[in-house]
Amino acid sequence: MSRLVAAASAGSALLAAHAAVNARLLRSPPAAVSSGGLRADAHSLVSVLLPVRDEAQRVGPCVRALLASRDVHYELLILDDGSTDSTAEVVRRTAGSDLRVRVLQGTPLPPGWLGKPHACQQLADDAAGDVLVFVDADVVLRPDGLSRSLALLDDAGLDLVSPYPRQLVATAAERLVQPLLQWSWLTFLPLRLAERSPSPALCAANGQLLACRAEAYRAAGGHTGVRAEVVEDVALARRFKAQGYRATVADGTDIATCRMYWGWPELRDGYTKSLWAAFGSTPGAVGATALLAWLYLLPPAAAVTGVVRRRSALTRMGVAGYVAGVAGRMVTAARTGGRLTDAPAHPASVAAMAWLTARSLRHHRAGTTTWKGRVIT
């Protein structure tokens, strides 16, 4: 056991160091973009695409923020994907008579499609811009958020960029699980190598806020090419890379916020919907969960065991591994606007994610995975 603990602690320390390197290399939108420098003329028109389904409680702040965007010539297309609440009414009331806004009514979901890819493809089909910016209804952008995202796309010579919004958390469950989103790719994905590599496997993206060149989007097959993908944002970025385009994730902490889930029931059901697919396969999900348990659960368990059994060497190794895991979380939190005070609960976060992964796999195998009233297979 001592060797396993020592190896896990060393691995945690190396990954914490890797997260620190990634935190320095992570691309961010330019600090300021003037209307003269971005280039109001760099893009003839930008299409901002917002798919919504039962988002009456969230969509208002999102639309208001988008309409406050500056230094960009854009159209805002909003597609109501069969909402059963007052989403469409809220959208129309918020948008008012703004001529930049068009509200579309989604068509019925065809066989073989999941809801979000279908909604996004319909929006893209109606878009006239040379850049497409996909936004989720729970995202609130700063007035310069769009212009700075476009500046990042241009300055870095990218075809797709996903500026990761600052993740807002309120409840204990959100604070426990949500920080693992940024932590995962900052810890495990070599960002600069992934950006340069043509390998689709080296890829991360977040559909909450995603900007891409329309020509590259269509050449990569658009959302039609990821029509049945639960984790459609990463799948789309992989298709870009497979076609020879450059795609990467970036830091959007300073330009957008997102409260992805409101409380435990939403969070539980949201991750149940997607985690079975997030690792590529059932064996991949099991293997990734086992790896995380070895790296981040075994050391603190060994530290407790060492104290109880008075084995000082085991205690020291376990504490070292625990501290390394917490350090990695703190690096991520400091870089992405998270809470440093939540980092000591990292083992509990990993345990919660393991439980959610197991639940997701169980529901997928039973065919009982649903989201917003639709069955996901």
Image (cartoon, helix red, strand yellow):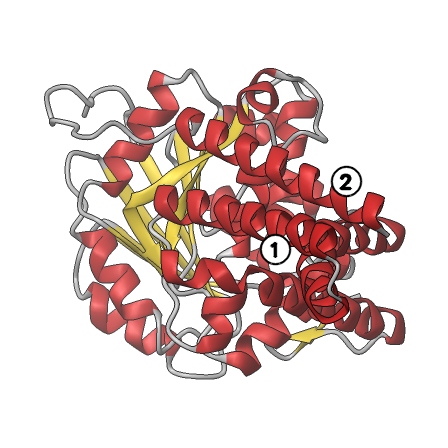
Count how many numbered circles sit on residues in the image.
2
Residue 192 at what x, y percent from top left?
Answer: 53, 20
Seen at 22% across and 35% down, the residue is: 73
Tell which of 23 and 70 is nearer to you: 23
Q: Mark 2 points at which residue?
A: 7
Q: Say left or right for 309 vs 69.
A: right
- Which quadrant of the view contains residue 15? top right
Q: Mark 1 points at which residue?
A: 118
- Which quadrant of the view contains residue 258? bottom left
Residue 193 at what x, y percent from top left?
Answer: 60, 19
Tell which of 224 and 61 is nearer to you: 61
Q: SS class of the residue under badge 2?
A: helix
**Mark 2: which amino acid?**
Ala
Seen at 36% across and 63% down, the residue is: 168
Q: Can I make out residue 339 in this image? A: no
Task: Say above or below: 140 vs 196.
Answer: below
